[in-house]
Amino acid sequence: MQLEKFNNRNVLVIGGAGYIGSVLVGKLMQAGAKVRVLDHLIYDNGYSLQHYFDEPNFSFINDDFCDGKVLNSALDGMTDVVLLASLVGDPICKRYPELAVKVNRDATHHLIDSMAEKGTERFTFASTCSNYGIHEGDALATETSDLNPQSIYAETKIAVETYILENAAKLPYSPTILRFATAYGFSPRMRFDLTVSHFASELAVGGSLDVYDPDTWRPYCHVRDLSKAIMTVLAEDKANVSGEVFNVGDTGQQFTKRMIVDEALKHIGEREVSYVSGDTDPRNYRVSFDKVAKQIDFTCDYSVERYVPSLINAVQNGVFTPSRSGNRYGNYEIPESIAKVAAG
Ligand SMILES: NC(=O)c1ccc[n+]([C@@H]2O[C@H](COP(=O)([O-])OP(=O)(O)OC[C@H]3O[C@@H](n4cnc5c(N)ncnc54)[C@H](O)[C@@H]3O)[C@@H](O)[C@H]2O)c1
């Protein structure tokens, strides 16, 4: 990646206070970009950006990107826009379905239209490999495979992908869709509601663990690698990325839930684990990451095998006290005031 390409960039990161965003923002500024974050801090997660406030290239707007006026002024002067803000994950979308449709689909369609008037040059949309839903058989899912959403979350992401692809030829900017593998890794805004960190932290503190549908497969990717992928796209020739869909991850980093438990137990020893089959979460997909490697030369630097023992070490040394309630370490609930305003 040519980092000097970021020197004259003004990058708006919508959702920049989140798990992936708070890592990306630091990397963008390190590369020389000016970064503006628009984030409504819906999980009270402003702590994730505290250490950036005295950076000269950082600015922050705490507001809702569903609000057209807010969006219009946030877009002023921005060369690049990265959309990470969403209701992220199946459980939170299931709990707030109307808000999920409003934020993940309707407000995003409005953003796509608005950027056409604002001189934006590039747009990166964070989508998900969850769109493949159930993809069985030996063949890996590629960007052209059928999508098979199993949740409102994936349905809203697919609706936006379709809107982008249908309009790509007439948009005056370069749009790129990134289908991220499930994230893991250390971030200023940790999430322990995602499989690798959930399992490893729970086992590290000696808790019993229920694992649903243990033999279903998923690809995984470190937050730093996901951030690197976004920056690779922003630095790439437009001809290679405009109107393109890329799976983002590593073909060698795909595991069943049982394999992740086994990886954690290697570093911990015996624990009580209950395996429960029964289609609680039927998603099951293995994905090809060949296109992103071949077309834009993106490969991952991190692995689940390296992360798991380091997370166990951090948890066992009291660095985190993961909790399955509140929002400090996950996407569990949205304050009524925000849910109400945003649904308004
Ligand atoms: N984390 C994963 O495993 C994963 C996997 C695949 C794709 N993705 C995609 O990556 C993106 C980022 O994921 P994440 O894990 O960092 O999520 P996150 O929930 O940690 O962060 C999302 C951020 O968006 C903000 N936000 C939500 N609604 C908003 C609104 N209306 N206005 C302004 N800000 C708002 C939240 O306050 C939060 O800071 C999402 O689009 C997600 O769909 C994530």
Image (tube, rainbow, N blue to C red):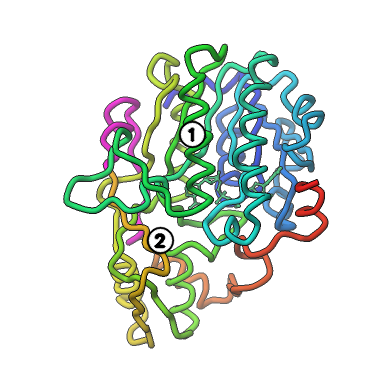
Q: Position of residue 303 (x, y in %)?
A: 34, 54
> In the rendered image of this protein, does residue 268 appear above or below residue 41?
below
Image quadrant assignment for residue 70: top right
Which residue: 76% across, 42% down? 53
Image quadrant assignment for residue 233: top left
Residue that carries the numbered disc 1 in the rendered image: 230
Q: Position of residue 17 (x, y in %)?
A: 66, 47
**Beta carbon at label 2 within 8 Å of ligand 1:** no
Residue that carries the numbered disc 2 in the rendered image: 307
Q: Earlier in the sequence, mark 2 or mark 1?
A: 1
Between 225 and 171, the one lying in front of the other is 171
Q: Position of residue 186 (x, y in %)?
A: 52, 57
Which residue: 29% across, 46% down? 287
Near mark 2 (Cα within 10 A), the count class, few <14, some 14-19 or many ≥20, is: some
Secondary structure under badge 1?
A: helix
> In the rendered image of this protein, does residue 329 appear above or below residue 81?
below
Q: Position of residue 43 (x, y in %)?
A: 70, 57
Give the magenta part as a residue range.
288-305
Q: Is residue 294 magenta?
A: yes
Which mark, by number, is residue 43? none
> In the rendered image of this protein, does residue 333 appear above or below residue 267?
above
Amino acid residing under circle 1: Ile
Q: Is residue 1 magenta?
A: no
Q: Is 211 placed left or right of 44 in the picture? A: left
